[in-house]
């Protein structure tokens, strides 16, 4: 948020929210959001049009913001552990009360109370799905679709109970429900295949992929499940590319070259950044290509910021440092390992692909245990999950040097490597200089050959 907007919000709050709420005239292309949240809250964020911004709070928890809005859309507030999604149309004045319990007044109050009530139900449903994951995603195709059908119909029936005068919203929100349903069906093969490795989806499932527009900006800005469905379909297209001459980054870019939606392009270009690294050939040309595809300033900023990092990680460059807690006791710094080759596994206990690499890593450690190499595993688990990390190190009998970062992803080592996805493997020489910021995985047979050649 720029200084002018900060000053504007400060003056509005200084005059008083009650005075502003008396004003009747406002442009039809704007909407006012105001309210009060618990006094102990220190940060409040608002998301509309795909942009998160921090809002100023008065000492007693009041806030006010004027949105530039030209069509109906969802808006979100985030504070403490709460996320409120509500419906806003041009010319609205929405009042949020969260001092003791969440309620809405002003424009579309009945609709927004409905959205809040539904969010609590859906949060409980998400928890149920999490706890029943092994049962739900082990259903056969017919039973799984029936399960999702029952949820969809219940949600549509609840929506239909809204009073007369809410028809425009019902049409708007129905799309949200239907895209949730479509995405839930479309993601079934990814989960079912964990239980049945040879499974191939039939037309009962694949029909949910067909005919989906991959380039609808209006839907992308309003329906998160539409975006997730587009992501899933585009990932499938990437997997189906048979041109072995393309790098992973080039494959990502090739499937979105014809897309015009700024929001979808932002999501996909940012998602491709973990593959945009110093090992990419013609890295400057790839930067120009990605910047040329981006349509939003924030997309270009993220791409440029990532390039500024990875361009410093070329072979021979000094590695970003670390100084992290060691499972065996004390802290370990990168400089403590000087004189040995260092292979680093950046992982977390919740990361499925990370866990799958562990047996291969343990085998590699055993084969090279007498060589001049240190195997270092750095967990990015948050501090509150430190005991889970310790338990996994113990229960899985993890070897090598087991470290945990001091603040999850928020530290200089992670930022220095521009890490956006895990696992990531890093190979350093005896002086702590980079051999590869994106080394092969332990499951890659070429890794052992590479390490032996360097030892």
Image: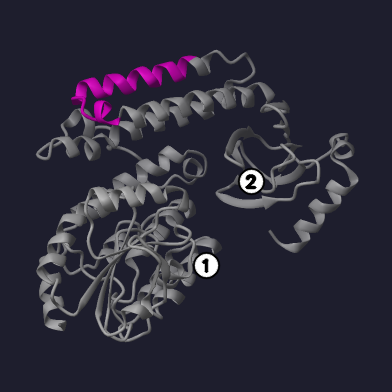
Q: Quadrant of the N terminus?
A: bottom right
Measured from the top left, where is residue 247 in percent x and y? 24, 68
Q: In this view of the protein, which residue sits in the foreground, 421 or 453?
A: 453
Residue 81 visible at all: yes
Which stretch appears magenta? 133-157
Judged left or right of residue 215, residue 137 is: left
Q: Is residue 136 magenta?
A: yes
- From the viewer's perspective, is residue 79 above or below residue 158? below
Badge 1, how many Cα within 10 Å: few under 14, some, many 20+?
Answer: few
Measured from the top left, where is residue 60 in percent x and y? 80, 41
Q: Which residue is mark 2?
A: 46
Measured from the top left, where is residue 307 in percent x and y? 43, 74
Q: In this view of the protein, which residue sits in the foreground, 361 or 109?
A: 361
Q: Main secondary structure of the magenta part?
A: helix
Badge 2, how many Cα within 10 Å: few under 14, some, many 20+?
Answer: many
The residues tagged by marks 2 and 1 sit, at their Cα atoms, a distance apart of 20 Å
Q: Quadrant of the C terminus?
A: bottom left
- From the viewer's perspective, is residue 20 above or below residue 406? above
SS for tag 2? strand
Q: Which residue is mark 1?
A: 301
- From the viewer's perspective, is residue 420 above or below residue 337? above
Instruction: Compare marks 2 and 1 and give the one earlier in the sequence.
Output: 2
Display coloring: one colour
């Amino acid at each position: 948020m720029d200084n002018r907007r900060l000053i504007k919000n400060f003056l509005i709050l200084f005059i008083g929210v009650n005075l502003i709420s008396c004003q009747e005239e406002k442009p039809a292309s704007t909407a006012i959001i105001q309210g009060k949240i618990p006094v102990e809250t220190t940060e409040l964020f608002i998301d509309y049009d795909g942009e998160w911004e921090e809002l100023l709070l008065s000492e007693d928890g009041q806030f006010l913001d004027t949105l530039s809005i030209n069509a109906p859309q969802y808006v979100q507030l985030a504070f403490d552990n709460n996320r409120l999604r509500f419906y806003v149309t041009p010319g609205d004045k929405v009042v949020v009360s969260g001092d003791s319990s969440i309620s809405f007044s002003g424009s579309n109050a009945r609709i927004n109370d409905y959205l809040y009530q539904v969010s609590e139900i859906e949060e409980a449903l998400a928890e149920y799905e999490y706890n029943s994951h092994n049962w739900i995603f082990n259903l056969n195709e017919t039973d799984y679709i029936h399960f999702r059908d029952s949820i969809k119909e219940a949600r549509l029936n609840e929506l239909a109970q809204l009073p007369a005068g809410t028809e425009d919203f019902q049409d708007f929100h129905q799309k949200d429900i239907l895209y949730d349903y479509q995405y839930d069906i479309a993601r079934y093969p990814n989960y079912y295949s964990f239980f049945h490795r040879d499974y191939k989806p039939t037309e009962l499932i694949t029909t949910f992929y067909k005919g989906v527009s991959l380039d609808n900006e209006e839907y992308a800005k309003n329906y998160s499940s539409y975006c997730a469905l587009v992501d899933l379909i585009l990932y499938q297209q990437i997997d189906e590319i048979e041109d072995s001459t393309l790098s992973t980054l080039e494959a990502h870019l090739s499937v979105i070259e014809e897309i015009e939606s700024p929001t979808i392009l932002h999501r996909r270009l940012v998602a491709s950044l973990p593959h945009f690294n110093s090992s990419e050939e013609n890295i400057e040309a790839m930067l120009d290509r990605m910047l040329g595809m981006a349509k939003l300033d924030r997309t270009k900023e993220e791409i440029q910021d990532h390039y500024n990092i990875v361009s410093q990680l070329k072979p021979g460059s000094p590695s970003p440092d670390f100084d992290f807690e060691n499972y065996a006791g004390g802290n370990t710094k990168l400089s403590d390992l000087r004189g040995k080759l260092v292979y680093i596994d950046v992982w977390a206990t919740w990361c499925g692909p990370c866990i799958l690499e562990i047996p291969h890593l343990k085998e590699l450690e055993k084969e090279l245990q007498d060589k001049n190499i240190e195997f270092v595993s750095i967990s990015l688990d948050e501090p509150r999950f430190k005991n889970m990390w310790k338990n996994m190190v113990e229960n899985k009998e993890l070897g090598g040097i087991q470290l945990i970062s001091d603040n999850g992803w928020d530290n200089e080592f992670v930022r220095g490597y521009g890490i956006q996805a895990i696992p990531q493997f890093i190979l350093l020489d005896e002086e702590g200089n980079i051999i590869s910021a994106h080394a092969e995985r332990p499951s890659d047979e070429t890794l052992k050959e590479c390490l032996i050649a360097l030892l």
